[in-house]
Image (cartoon, rainbow, N blue to C red):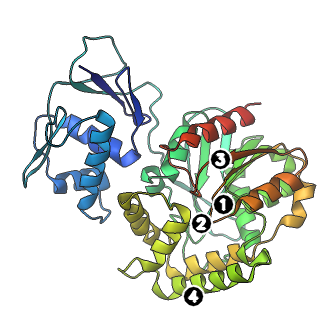
Amino acid sequence: MKQWVLDLDDGSLSSGQSLSNLTPKAADVLSFLIANAGTVMSRDEILREVWRDLHVSPDLVREYIFEIRKALEDSATRPKYIETVGRRGFRLIGPVSTQAKIETSPASDKVKAITNNRSIQKPVVKYCRSKDGTSIAHAASGQGLPLLFAGSWMTHLDMDWDSPAYGDYVRHLSDRFAVIRYDQRGNGLSQWSDVDISFERMVDDMEVVVETYGYEKVAILGMSQGASVAIAYTLRQPDRVSHLILNGGYARGRRQRGNDAEHEESEALVSLIRHSWGNDNPAARQILTTLFMPEASQGQMQWFNEFQKQCGPAENIAQFRALFDDMNVADLLPKVTTATLVLHSDRDSVAPLSEGKLLASQIAGASFVQLNSPNHMLFATEDDFAKMIESIDQFAHS
C-alpha cells in the first residue's frame, strides 16, 4: 500500500515509487480536499475556494479531479482516495496527516500534505511611476540573485500566480531567485487609461522598476515580446544587467518577417480584438489561447480565456498586438555584449523557432537551448520544463 505526499510548495505528489507534478489548480483542489478530509465537498464549494471570484465552468472541477486521480493511480469506480458522492460532490477518504516536513512512517493508503520552510507566499503588489507619470504595478517574491521578468502582454500580478502556465514560471523561479515582476502600462494592475502605449515607454517602465528595487545589477528574463524590450533596456543600461535570458522571444514582429500571410493574420487579429474582446463569447480570446498553448486541457484553456478579459480593455489589447507585430529590433542584436541565453520551443506557433535562432546567431556568444514543446509557454508537466528552469538557474548563477 502506498503513502502519498503532496508538497504544497511545488505541487509534486510522491509515493516513494511514483512522482507526479500536479498543475497548480489540481494541487489547490487536492489541498482543499485534504483540509476537509472525510467531508463531502460540492463542486460549488470547491469552485468558491479554489477559483475565488473568477467565473468558470463547474466542469473544471471534474477535470482536475480526473487529473488528481490519475496521479494517485486511483479509480472512480473503486476509489481508495477520492470518492464521488452522487449529485453531492467529492470526498477524500482514508487517513490524512499534515506536517512541516516528510517523516518516515508505515506505508498505507494515505495522502499527506506537507509544507517546507521555503514556502513562497503570493507577493504584495506595490506601485511606482514611470517617467511620464504612468502608474506601474510591481511585486517581488523569493530570495537570492535578482531576476527581473520583463513586462509583457496580458499579465496580471495577482492572477498570474494561479495561471496554469505562467504561474509555474513564477513559483519555480521564485524558489531560486529574488523575482521582480511588473505589469506593463495599460495592462494588468498598472494604469489602463490615458497611457502612451509605445515601445520607448515600455523601456522606460523597465528602467524605473529596476531603479525602484535598487540592485546594482539584475538578470533579466524577457519572454515573448518582452525579449525585445529587454534587449533595448540592456543596451540603454548595460552596466545594470548581469545576464540576459530570452525565452520564446523574437526581434521581429509578425509584420516584419517578410511573410504576407502573417501580415494579413496580424491585421485580422487586431481587428477582431478591437471589436469583440470583452464579449461573453470568448472566440477572439480562444484564438490567442490556442496559439499560446495548443496542448492545454479544456480547463486550462477556459481559465486563460476568462483571464484575458481581466488584463485590459479591448483598445489597449489591440494596440499592444499591433505594436508587437510591428516591432523590429534586429539591428540592435549585434550591439549586445551582455551574457545571453536564448531558449525556444521547437514548435512554437507564436514565435517560430527561426526567430529564436536569429536572436542566438546575432548576439555574440549567446547560448541556445531548444525545448521540445508546441507551447509558447511550457507547462510544469512537460518533460522539458525542468530542463528550461535548470538552464536559467545555471546560466544566471554562472
* Secondary structure beneath label 3: strand
Distance from disc 2 to disc 4, alpha carbons, whole Å, reads 17 Å
Task: Judge the density around disc 1: few (<14), some (14-19), many (≥20) Cα neighbours within 10 Å.
Answer: many
15, above or below 78, in the image: above
User: Which mark identifies residue 371?
Assistant: 3
- Marks 1 and 4: in contact by CB < 8 Å? no
Mark 4: amino acid: Ser
Mark 2: amino acid: Trp
Task: Judge the density around disc 2: few (<14), some (14-19), many (≥20) Cα neighbours within 10 Å.
Answer: many
The spot of residue 48 in percent (x, y) is: 23, 55
Left or right, residue 238 beside residue 207: right
At 49% from the left and 78% from the top, the residue drawn is: 313
Q: Nearer the viewer, mark 2 or mark 1?
A: 1
Q: Earlier in the sequence, mark 4 or mark 3?
A: 4
233, above or below 343, in the image: below
- Marks 4 and 2: in contact by CB < 8 Å? no
The spot of residue 372 in percent (x, y) is: 62, 48
Q: For mark 4, what is the residue?
A: 271
Q: Earlier in the sequence, mark 4 or mark 1?
A: 1
At 24% from the left and 36% from the top, the residue drawn is: 74
